[in-house]
Amino acid sequence: MPVLVASDLDRTLIYSAAALALTMPDARAPRLLCVEVHESRPLSFMTETAAALLTDLGDAAVFVPTTTRTRKQYQRINLPGPQPKYAICANGGHLMVDGVSDLDWHARVTARLAEHCAPLDEVRGHLLATADPAWVRKHRVAEDLFAYLVVERELLPEDWLKELAVWAENRGWTVSLQGRKIYAVPKPLTKSAAMREVARRTGAHLTLAAGDSLLDADLLLAADKGWRPGHGELADAGWSAPAIAALPERGVLAGERILRELLKETRGTAR
């Protein structure tokens, strides 16, 4: 009876240079491993210690990378350890099995979205009409499932974001601000539903999860036990739940701590 570990990636296990939060003296900074290259440039990192922990975790549990990234964006990542059999992409819109999207799962998800949410074109049109080009750098649609903007965070009006959240709520969508990206995602498009499907297929008796953003809240609540770092949307909001540990570490050292906790829990269960 395996343990299933479903973890968010960006700003949970892997970190861009801007998100590393290396506040210690340079000589005491941890050694870093690059785990993602994009357009010939290093993009995402974890500590070497975290890489070793993830390798051990991949041997001890069913490790499921769980991300809002598209399949193409996910496939740029080269995580250490055994190749995961399952991965959750596009916030649960694609369940990857041995690197290939499960078409039946995707069809079930898209049918649910069509039934319960305003169409993507309406949401995208609203974003295009109301977002100011002065602070928007990119408009994007991900996997024909959800939309997001890349913005200049310091120029973003707080009132606009609040108004967008109310507008989206009334149409069955949710809004999440992560770094420089503003996501508009249909409410039924969840990481938790895909995690439950993997748990069903693997017969996992225990589910563990980690994440930092509003889009990870459902994943954390669906797991038997979860962890969040000291940074991100959930930390900023003071979000907590009975089975969720709020860790104090921020930046790349939080990723190391999360992996240590996941591995400790997995090994403790095996005894």
Image (spheres, rainbow, N blue to C red):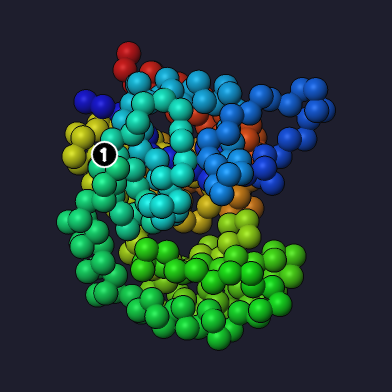
The amino acid type of the residue labelled 1 equals Asp
| Residue 243, percent from left and from top | 44, 39
Tell me: 262 left or right of 193.
right
Residue extending furthest toward the bottom: 129
Q: Nearer the viewer, residue 175 or 271?
A: 175
User: Which residue sits at x=26%, y=47%?
Assistant: 100
User: Which residue sits at x=61%, y=79%?
Assistant: 131
**What residue sits right under mark 1 in the picture?**
98
User: Which residue sits at x=59%, y=84%?
Assistant: 130
Looking at the rendered image, the quarter that the N terminus falls into is top left
| Residue 263, percent from left and from top | 44, 23
Q: Residues within 10 Å of mark 1 (few under 14, many from 20)?
A: few
SS for dot 1:
loop
Residue 190 visible in this rendered orientation of the protein:
yes
Tell me: 224 left or right of 47.
left
The image shows residue 227, relative to residue 238, as above or below, that is above
| Residue 251, percent from left and from top | 65, 39
Tell me: 258 left or right of 110.
right
Residue 220 visible in this rendered orientation of the protein:
no
The image shows residue 15, relative to residue 168, as above or below, that is above
Q: Image quadrant of residue 112?
A: bottom left
Q: Nearer the viewer, residue 209 or 88?
A: 88
Looking at the rendered image, the quarter that the C terminus falls into is top left
| Residue 164, percent from left and from top | 55, 77
User: Which residue sits at x=50%, y=68%?
Assistant: 140
